[in-house]
Amino acid sequence: MRRILAVGPVPVVVLALVCGGAWGAEASEAGAPEGLAKAVAAMRKIDPASLSEEQQKAKAKELDEAWKTLVGAGPAGAAALKAELKALDAAKEKDDFFRLGACAVLWQVGKLDEAGTIAAVWLGDVALPANYHYVFFVALDAARTQDPRALPMLTACLKDKEGSAHITVHVMDVTWPLTHAFLWGAFGSKGLPALAQVLDTSKDGTAVASAALLLARAQYLPALEKIRNLARKGKGVARGTAVRCLGIYGHPDDFAFLVAGLKAQAPEEAMDFAFALYEYEDLRAAPALALLLASEDAALRSEVLGALAYLPTPEGLEALHAYAAAPKDEKEGQRAAAAVAGLLKAAGLGLTWETFAAKSPDEKKATVAALVAGYAEAYVLRPDDRRLTHEELLKAAEQWKKNGRITGGDYAWVEDRHVLAASTPEDIDLLLDVKAKVCLRVSDECLPELRTLDKLVSRLGRSRYRKVVGITEKVEPAK
């Protein structure tokens, strides 16, 4: 097994480190103090960028032997690494590559018994992206245990927004916020209180933002008021992400705040509110969003184009059509025109822009209302549908967890609408724990399943306080 020297996507084997067994722990001269000292020294002061390809291969071979020695020595190997880490701290010396590699070896030696030490290193003065593979796969292995002792490690990871893990088999780069979605998702529903605590205790904006986003996707209601406070009084990335989270929660009390935020002077701030209103799914936002197509900021205009296409209204269609005729960017104009044509086609009436524009205001509203109603059909049981009982849902969930997927098996016939009809908000944790097992696949092909579970959780969570949980003319409180 080769050690990872490069920080970018390279075809190396790292899963064996965190998922496989340790190397043989038989005693040898290499495990003697001088052998351990030599192994630790081999891990120090490595700068992958300064090494040629041949030098990297040679260093990888040396590291392979060093790690075997340290793991084979068991507690003695761990002690040697801890002593070196302590010496680095005392000297205030930077060696991020060593620190991260040392944590990977400590995990292999002691697993959860070393979780506290690993978390302390990760939380310290170390750049996790220096070799994020050592972080991500170790943290994922810790998360799969769903043991509370792993939580400090997962919490330490929240400070990072730049790290990227390359999944060679699927040719996939896992980046923020998907990195945290996999790690915390794999831990399951029992990790939510720890995430909520981060909102209270962390002074790191990225950590707070990451925690807030995970809590919102899980529809964790105890965190909503804290996130509201962040959206109103927070700063930087924590505030911007909190704004977006309010859209994900979609509570009736937050609409006025979100619409008012579109008037923000800074384009990046206005974009947070536009993102939130897309997620919020209230058609009343369309006219206010349409005004932002006049912005000089391309990223903001792109967000607004997506929101107007997702939240169809007569006013939104007119704004998209007008922008397509006189766009600030040719590709944006093409995108706007395609959105209009797609929406009119989806209405199922064979409409063109001219035939739609000729309709009366009431007829336009009726056309768009029919379109919106069609969006909800995927979540409504059909008259001839087979019914899924709650008892069957529990059995299905157990099979999904065992298989690590929500497709195939005895319940291949179950779709979103069957699950929703058999579920209540009390089943959110059940679905999050199913998601935990799906997360362990860490691949692009599991992402649609994760999105399906997130959508089910969203609709169940919103049903606690919204009359209509999806796109609606006006978000109103549940009765």
Image (tube, rainbow, N blue to C red):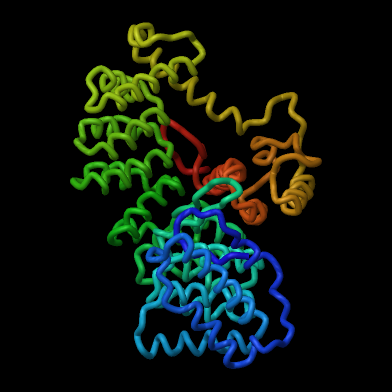
- Counting labels gives 0
Q: Is residue 74 above or below residue 215?
A: below
Comparing 72 with 375, the one in front is 72
Q: Is residue 270 visible?
A: yes
Q: Residue furthest front?
A: 54
* Residue at 28% across, 30% down: 290
User: Residue 342, percent across and down?
Assistant: 44, 19
User: Residue 28, percent across and down?
Assistant: 70, 87
Query: Which quadrant would the N terminus be assigned to in this image?
Result: bottom right
* Residue at 25% across, 27% down: 329
* Residue at 53% across, 63% down: 136
Q: Residue furthest bottom?
A: 33
Left or right of 118 in this view: 424: right
Left or right of 323 in this view: 312: right
Left or right of 238 in this view: 439: right
User: Residue 378, percent across and down?
Assistant: 60, 30
